[in-house]
Image (tube, rainbow, N blue to C red):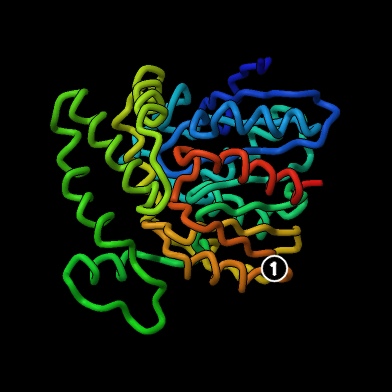
Amino acid sequence: MLTAEEKFVHSGQVQLWTERFGHPADPTVLLVMGTATPAIGWPDEFVQALVRSGRQVIRFDHRDTGRSDCVDFTRHPYALADLSGDTVAVLDSHGVAAAHVVGTSLGAAIGQWLAVHQPARVRTLTALAASPMGNNPGPAWARALAGQPAAADELPPPTAEFLSHLPVAAKAPRGTAQQRMEADLHMWRVLNGGVLPFNELAARRFVEECYARATNVAAASNHDLAGQRWADDRRAALSRITAATLVLHGSDDPLFPQAHGVALAAQIPGAQLEIVPGMGHHPFFAPGLTERIADLVIRHTS
């Protein structure tokens, strides 16, 4: 059974909910979730495996998710640098000078940002289901939605199945709470990919828990707005990363096809690339993958 210490910390004016597991003297693994997803996106089984291996583990709710503060994005817009600043505030508040940073999707972009701009805070980096932080997928998505081919120098857009779900997701906020949850459940089903089984019961419980603990479910859409704000800090060369880096990518990722992970690993000196057969964009609803990802992270952070 996991024993956790819950703590609210401040990043500027934003209050963030955090949860710490394990012994403070052990090496710290900081888990950074993806877009619009709270800390519980990292399943307890995954956290427990890391703690059993002799790590202190910290996970936290991004701003605009879970129990953390929601932001008026119109008045106080934020970008990747601000979300990265939140992770630094989490480490500072827990007295951690440097951590093994494990991020997925948006969380992996945050990890890249930290490894480039705050290298002293990153002992190792694990980037799961990620694209290079300087990649702007907007034009490729627009072309794909219009039925046009991607440009020669672009990384591939999401799969047709993922893109076909976007209109459904856009309509979901206007529906009932149950309809919104069903739309979210379907999104997780799509993100699982089309190869490995999908644990619908676990995903449904996760969606219901997200809704139950959120201050404002709709606020999480601000992450999409933040992702559209581009600045030179995102375009910084990943060749500046000195932390030992593991890039974990699924062969069946519908959001960032495999070429994204290959491109990311190619840009980081000495990065290890691990392609997981059949894995989609989110591994934790596919039976057996939670244990496999945990083992890979444990080996990388040893």
34, above or below 25, in the image: below
On the image, the x and y values in percent for residue 141 come to: 28, 65
Residue 249 or 150: which is nearer the viewer? 249
Secondary structure of the residue carrying numbered label 1: helix
Left or right side of 92 for 132: left
Residue 4 visible in this rendered orientation of the protein: no
- Outermost residue toward the right? 25
* Quadrant assignment, res 222: top left
The three-letter code of the residue at mark 1 reads Arg
Left or right side of 274 for 154: left
On the image, the x and y values in percent for residue 7 come to: 62, 18
Rate crowding at label 1 as few (under 14), some (14 to 19) or many (20 or more) other CA atoms within 10 Å.
some
**Residue at mark 1:** 240
Residue 36 or 63: which is nearer the viewer? 36
Residue 34 visible in this rendered orientation of the protein: yes
Q: Residue at x 67, y 24 (%)?
A: 20
* Quadrant assignment, res 144: bottom left
